[in-house]
Image: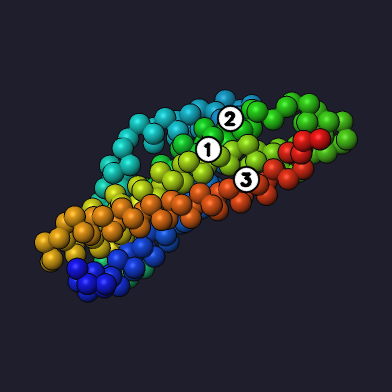
């Protein structure tokens, strides 16, 4: 084995970059969906509660791989019809976009429960104090609830992000050139499955370690003012 992995080193590096982009894009979408789902489930309005319950239940009940396939292949006709309106009959959803939507949808469904638990963990007295000070409900949400919610939810979100990074391998089934796709192509050419799958495993492990370090930094920063040193 040469240092450039039989010439596939650059391809694996490009696949790693694509995996990072996909994970961060899905994370951004999932955080928004998770927060909206949690706010819906903790809302006093019944229709919003039902909507939040339906989202988290339906999405979590279907495997992530199926969501990738359903979103990628299930939107073909719709995208073609939309493209026809703008003179682009060949318009279709790219593998990257389909993977972002599918993984973001799944991440958001689990993040909904993490955010919901974090919101419920905040003492009701904090909201009552805000009302006593004359703050509006919107201001209480942004200035009192959300900052505390992030601190409580960070460990759970960190674990979900670790799972999300590994789930990016599922998008290889629709042709996205991420780590696993690059490794599979290298294996098909060189007939060295152990070498390239081991390299892929080491890359995922390295990304996980980097994510853990970043999560530790975020948790430490979010806990400032809440952790007291021993006397």
* Label 2 with label 3: CB-CB less than 8 Å: no
133, 191: nearer the viewer: 191
Q: Residue at x 42, y 61 (%)?
A: 21
Look at discs 2 and 3 and give the one toward the viewer.
Answer: 3
Residue at (42% x, 30% y) in the render: 57
Q: Residues within 10 Å of mark 2 (few under 14, many from 20)?
A: some
Q: Quadrant of the C terminus?
A: top right
Mark identifier at residue 219: 3
Q: Residue at x 21, y 59 (%)?
A: 195
Q: Could you say where residue 77 lies in the image, as x and y percent from the top left? A: 26, 54
Q: Earlier in the sequence, mark 2 or mark 3?
A: 2
Report how far apart the C-alphas of labels 2 and 3 lie in the structure. 17 Å
Query: Whole-Å distance between the Cαs marked 1 and 3?
Result: 11 Å
| Vertical position of residue 8 compared to residue 50: above or below | below
Residue 205 visible here: yes
User: Residue at point 32% right, 35% down?
Assistant: 62
| Disc 1: which residue | 156
Picture disc at residue 188: none
Sequence-earlier tag: 1 or 3: 1
Q: Secondary structure at mark 3?
A: helix
The quadrant the N terminus occupies is bottom left
Percent across and percent down for residue 30 are 48, 47
Q: Position of residue 129 (x, y in %)?
A: 83, 31
- Mark 2 or mark 1: whose residue is earlier in sequence: 2
| Relative to 144, residue 182 above or below | below
Nearest the camera: 130 or 16?
Answer: 16
SS of the residue under disc 1 = helix
Q: Position of residue 228 (x, y in %)?
A: 77, 38
Residue 117, disc = 2
């Amino acid at each position: 084995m040469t240092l450039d992995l039989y010439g596939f080193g650059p391809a694996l590096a490009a696949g790693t970059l694509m995996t990072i982009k996909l994970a961060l894009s899905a994370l951004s979408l999932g955080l928004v969906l998770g927060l909206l789902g949690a706010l819906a489930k903790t809302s006093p309005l019944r229709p919003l509660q039902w909507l939040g319950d339906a989202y988290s239940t339906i999405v979590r009940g279907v495997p992530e791989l199926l969501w990738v396939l359903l979103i990628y292949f299930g939107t073909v006709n719709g995208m073609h019809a939309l493209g026809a309106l703008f003179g682009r009959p060949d318009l279709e959803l790219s593998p990257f976009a389909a993977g972002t939507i599918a993984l973001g949808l799944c991440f958001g469904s689990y993040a909904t429960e993490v955010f919901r638990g974090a919101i419920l963990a905040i003492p009701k007295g904090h909201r009552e104090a805000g009302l006593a000070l004359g703050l509006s409900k919107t201001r209480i949400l942004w200035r009192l609830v959300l900052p505390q919610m992030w601190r409580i939810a960070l460990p759970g979100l960190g674990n979900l992000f670790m799972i999300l990074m590994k789930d990016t391998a599922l998008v290889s089934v629709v042709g996205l050139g991420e780590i696993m796709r690059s490794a599979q192509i290298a294996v098909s050419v060189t007939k060295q499955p152990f070498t390239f799958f081991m390299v892929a495993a080491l890359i995922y492990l390295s990304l996980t370690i980097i994510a853990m370090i970043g999560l530790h930094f975020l948790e430490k920063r979010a806990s400032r003012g809440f952790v007291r040193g021993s006397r």
